[in-house]
Image: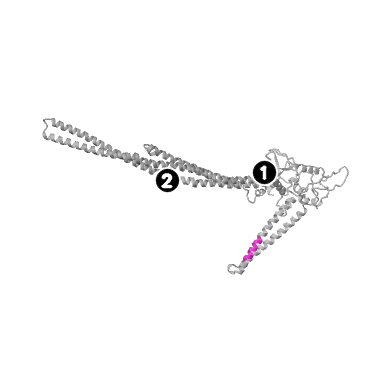
Amino acid sequence: MSWGTELWDQFDNLEKHTQWGIDILEKYIKFVKERTDIELSYAKQLRNLSKKYQPKKNSKEEEEYKYTACKAFLSTLNEMNDYAGQHEVISENMTSQITVDLMRYVQELKQERKSNFHDGRKAQQHIETCWKQLESSKRRFERDCKEADRAQQYFEKMDADINVTKADVEKARQQAQLRHQMAEDSKADYSSILQRFNQEQWEYYHTHIPNIFQKIQEMEERRIVRIGESMKTYAEVDRQVIPIIGKCLDGIVKAAESIDQKNDSQLVVEAYKSGFEPPGDIEFEDYTQPMKRTVSENSLSSSKEGKPELKFGGKSRGKLWPFIKKNKGATPEDFSNLPPEQRRKKLQQKVDDLNKEIQKETDQRDAITKMKDVYLKNPQMGDPASLDHKLAEVTQNIERLRLETQKFEAWLAEVEGRLPARSEQARRQSGMYDGQTHQTVTNCAQDRESPDGSYTEEQSQESELKVLATDFDDEFDDEEPLPAIGTCKALYTFEGQNEGTISVVEGEMLSVIEEDKGDGWTRIRRNEDEEGYVPTSYVEVYLDKNAKGS
């Protein structure tokens, strides 16, 4: 099968077909280019998504990633970042191995096609010129033959006419002979041109056109093979990244399998355990006979010098354990506003940070000392005296940090001395009352309020209760009601079932007496006798700038 023999008369159709083939190739190049753009865009979106959910440095989110579930999520984000990188690799490889290569090939293909069809048109023009020459010689031969016939007939007529002179007859005879000679010359010329044309035509249809069409056929077949190879490369580029993408997905699965719910539960205990022991049983107090009530065992309070005893009675002030608020103003340096266990952790963390700073300053001092020794041995390298000021400054910083560390270590020793034995069972105990236990204790406490409004119990666990009194007696002192610092509107209905909370109805307006301290609760008041905490997300707060500023 050859286009030169089968399609010898389809020059124009072949020209259209080969142009269509180039258009198809350019369309495929455009398709691959758009695919690379999609891969780049997808990779960019994946990277942005991964970056969006990465924890911010030195933020509360970063602390949350100590939990195994959060660590697994962080690993997933990192794997997705690598996953995005593979899509960038797909885009780069398709661009270099397909798009760039095919675009260069298209230019070469256009040039080759142009050259082949130029040769074909040149051959066409040559055979057309030969044909025109043949037609011209043929018409000239025909014309000369007719002229010779007319001249012969004129001579015969003149020769038969007796009235014509002999000179005129001779002249007609000579003209007829001339015309016959011209016809013979035209015949010979026509015959020669015809033979030459037939030779040219044979070469045109059996040599020139087959050769040109064969080149065009080979060019078109190379184009078809090239586009097929490009499609294979297209698939291979994707296939090459599949193992790495599989590793990314395996990493996500491995991260998911590393989640340990028990470990996360233990971390919650460590993060929020207060270190308090649950209260003991409440003793029965008989009011039928006068008696001086003493503080019962396991009381949550103990009297302080110069201050009245703790009060649970009177107006409902909502100061119950789950909602104790100590964050009034700046945080004390010794973290005395925190429960014992949390205070111990904060102090331990502070001591560790100070020790790191001391180590850093010590390393700097050692480096300066070594540099000074080098300067002393080699004065040309520098002046040793120039380092004295820096060395003194670093030494002073070390001494300051050591004093600071000693101070926090003393507080830490004090807290660890007061904390009860940390048995395995105690570690599993929560440092707060749950809703039911807390409600029972509070109700009993209110029932046992003495006539003068104070609340007293026996002091059988004096060492433990002193810590509680020190940390929390300010919260239970009889003080004036807190002033309103703004108003709020209830966005949703909230059923305050636990002690210390207050129920609100959607759309209700209330007074704000203490804003959210970061635990998700806002303290509000309905009237002089009703106040408590509601979730901050359930209300829309309008703070009074003047009240807040004061």
Give amino acid for label 1: Tyr
Q: Earlier in the sequence, mark 1 or mark 2?
A: 2
Question: Is 494 on the left-hand or right-hand side of 131?
Answer: right
For mark 1, what is the residue? 542
| 1 vs 2, front mark | 2
Helix, strand or loop at label 2? It is helix
Whether residue 480 appears in magenta in the rendering, the answer is no
Q: Residue 29's spot in the image, x, y percent?
A: 47, 43
Any mark on residue 108, and which?
2
**Which residues are drawn in magenta?**
361-371
The front one of 147 and 503 is 147
Whether residue 369 appears in magenta in the rendering, the answer is yes
Task: Give the image's coloring scheme.
Answer: one colour
Give amino acid for label 2: Glu
Q: Residue 375, relative to residue 531: is it above or below?
A: below
The front one of 84 and 269 is 84
Q: Residue 479's spot in the image, x, y percent?
A: 77, 48
Q: Residue 337's spot in the image, x, y percent?
A: 73, 51
Instruction: Classify residue 129 by image quadrant.
Output: top left
Q: Residues within 10 Å of mark 1 (few under 14, many from 20)?
A: few
Question: Is 166 on the left-hand or right-hand side of 279?
Answer: left
Residue 533 can be seen in this image: yes
Q: Are marks 1 and 2 in contact (CB under 8 Å)?
A: no
Residue at the extreme front of the image, as rendered: 1
The front one of 515 and 358 is 358
Helix, strand or loop at label 1? It is strand
The chief SS type of the magenta part is: helix
Q: Residue 130's spot in the image, x, y percent?
A: 30, 39
Question: Is 184 on the left-hand or right-hand side of 354?
Answer: left
Instruction: Classify residue 387 by image quadrant.
Output: bottom right
* Residue drawn 15% across the image and 31% down it: 157
Q: Residues within 10 Å of mark 2 (few under 14, many from 20)?
A: few
